[in-house]
Amino acid sequence: MYVSMKDMLQRANEGNYAVMAINCFNIETARAVIAAAQEERAPIIINIVQEHLVHHADSELIAPIVRKLAERASVEVALNLDHGEEIAIIKKCIIDGFSSVMVDASRFDLDGNIRMTKQITEFAAAYGVSVEGEIGCMGGSEGGKYTSDSMLTNPQEARLFATKTGIDALAISIGTSHGNYPEGYHPEFDFARLKEIKEATSMPLVLHGGSGSGDENIKNAVEFGINKINVGCDFMNANVDSIKKHLKKDPEINYWVMMHQVEKDSKEIVKHYIRLSKSNGKSL
């Protein structure tokens, strides 16, 4: 079933669980993620980050593929533009059939963020497309530029932002960063801040940078109000690990055979996160 994020995240908000959003960029990654959700009977979100959209598979190519895969599935599947930073690109994704978009205007001040995000929510409404906004900023592990205290989401700004923009989901910063963490490192989550933001907004909240955060952090984040969890690196790493494994076992392996094995192997990390998020069995 091809749907927007709105209803699935509202149910998650009411039911105190989270829906997984996995970063994909082609038919193989999207098919693996949807297959994992199908096996777990979970709603799922296919995230495509703007960079991958621009440099690998544009919205005219990827939207029909994901839509067809979703229509063949019996679980709910949303296609979401992740970290859309350019208005023209976001609008084109909406026109080309994405069911959801995430507006990343966090580089602006609060007023500028509200202005850009509201422009997209008004445009998306005519297409029945759900919108995720972001308040606060996310760092990245590459180069050691982790999320700092000054980048964390202010609960009162979150409430104002949500009210003025009309978004369906709110991405917040509570300590995670994008990218791969060093081995053995887990970020420190500001759960008190998360609870305060939840009380201030009462809306579906989104955790970016879920990869490598640690199972206990993920479980507690869901318990305290996160309803959508973005995972990119852990899924991509699982694909790479599978490729290495099959090449080591058979350096002459047929590429087509290997790719199907990679799809099969990479489903497992998706299923793990689905269970952590408590969304297994939650699809309509």
Image (tube, helix red, strand yellow):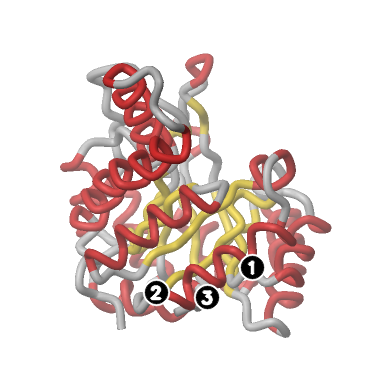
Question: Mark 2 belongs to which amino acid?
Answer: Ala
Q: CA distance from mark 1 to mark 3?
A: 15 Å
* Crowd tier of the residue under label 2, counting other residues whose Cα lies within 10 Å: few below 14, some 14–19, many 20 or above: some
Q: Please give the residue where the numbered disc 2 appears in the rendered image.
A: 73
Q: Earlier in the sequence, mark 2 or mark 1?
A: 1
Asked if marks 2 and 1 touch (Cβ < 8 Å), the reply is no
Q: Quadrant of the N terminus?
A: bottom left
Q: Residue 204 appears in which quarter of the rendering?
A: bottom left
Say which of 254 and 236 sits in front. 254
Horizontal and vertical percent position of residue 107: 69, 42
Check disc 1 and report the residue beneath it.
64
Q: Give how far across and how far down residue 25 sits, in percent.
A: 56, 47
Earlier in the chain: of badge 2 and badge 3, it is 3
Task: Tell me which amino acid carries mark 3.
Answer: Ser
Q: Is residue 160 in sight in this rendering? A: no
What residue is pinned by disc 3?
4
